[in-house]
Image (cartoon, rainbow, N blue to C red):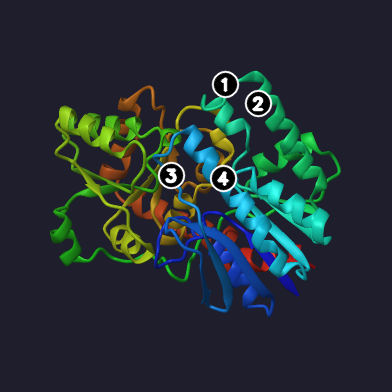
Amino acid sequence: MKVLILHQHFNTPEKGGAIRSYYLATALAGRGVKVTVITAHNENVYRQETIEHIDVHYLPVAYDNRFGFVARSWSFLKYVLGTVKLARQFRDADYCYAISVPLTVGIAAMWIKMRYKVSYIFEVGDLWPEAPIQLGFVNNFVFAQLLYVLEKRIYKSAHAVVALSSAIREAIEKKVPGKAIHLVPNMADCDFYKPGTKDPDLERQYHVQEKLVVSYIGAAGVANGLDSFLECANTSRKAQLPVHFFLCGDGAETERLKGHAQKLGLTNLTFLDFRNRDGVKELLNITDAVFISYKQVPVLETGSPNKFFDGLAAGKLIIINFGGWIKKEIEDAQCGFYYNPQQPTDFVKKLSAYLYEGGLLERAKAASRKLGEQKYSRERLSGLFAEVFK
């Protein structure tokens, strides 16, 4: 079987960032499927390379989290045009697997289906255009309606749809009743990330001896609502809790957040640069709790953030500031807690229990790892993903 994967933001473990598409591609390649990926990079030249039996083609299409709406839209459009042009080389594919976001990748998938009769499967990790509309990036009514029409057409034209959460699946079912929708969440790499004792050398390096460590690892964009993370650090400082916070990543909000943290005098918060999977593993060694943050926008509660699954695999306490399916998941598994971002003292009260109630933190960590192994392991979900093509 030959599968053509379209994903503008394909990453490898060495590069860092979200690597779901890498996991999916290797899952297929490991089962004898010939996999080709069309992606993009910020270099000015086209490049091709083979990564673990995956044929990866990089289009020269720049993208950055700091881009404004117009620059992002132009980047998405350039990727579609480049993909359509390059796809001629792979018109003998059995399936095309198109990964959003952005939604516009579906245009390329529909064109490939029409031109070369290659059926496509469409993956939905975030509900577009609902997300940019609720976030205020799209505020023109006519344009928004056109995007809704495009979304529905992409779903209807797809051979099947893959949803990354049950909430996303339910939303798509309402738009296209009867469509085959597979639920394949993000993966917990339980072989790479493992629970373990803290390395004393790393604790000294990061200056967190005898501290409970809370880490946010990921993008620092508008949608992430990281002002609430800073407020948690500020409230914990005032309460004199023995807690240190790390904000590891990069994005459009990074510099503003650094300035805000300086004004607040947050000596218990450290900013760390973006790092690859090995760097994340190092930070997780000294981390007790993984913090997952979203701006208070309803559609964001449907998402499937990678950092949640890394936290499960590494066996960490999970802290969130939003509702939805993940809130229910961690509360049912007793591996974390939700706090009200409008009431930072709620964070201090709930975290204090894990500081001072003997055994509570370790039980939550064990429950986190158990949830990752039993429900979201990379091995299990790779097999589930491969079944989609059968």
Amino acid residing under circle 4 = Phe
Going from N to C along the chain, the mark reached first, 4 or 2, is 4
Does the residue at mark 1 contact the one at mark 2 (Cβ under 8 Å)? Answer: yes
Camera-nearest label, 1 or 4? 4
Please say whether residue 218 is visible from this viewpoint. Answer: yes
Q: In 3D space, how far apart are the residues under numbered discs 4 and 3 (Cα atoms)?
A: 36 Å
> Which residue matches tag 2?
144
Which structural element holds mark 3?
strand
**Residue 113 quadrant:** bottom right
> Which residue matches tag 3?
336
Tell me if 2 is positioned left or right of 179 in this view.
left
Relative to 128, does residue 79 appear above or below in the rendering? Answer: below
Nearer to us in this view, 316 or 5:
5
Binning the other alpha carbons within 10 Å of mark 2 as few (below 14), some (14 to 19) or many (20 upward) gives: some
Amino acid residing under circle 3 = Gly
**Residue 86 quadrant:** bottom right
Which structural element holds mark 2?
helix
Q: In 3D space, how far apart are the residues under numbered discs 3 and 2 (Cα atoms)?
A: 37 Å
> Which residue matches tag 1?
139
Q: Residue at x 34, y 36 (%)?
A: 253
Binning the other alpha carbons within 10 Å of mark 3 as few (below 14), some (14 to 19) or many (20 upward) gives: many
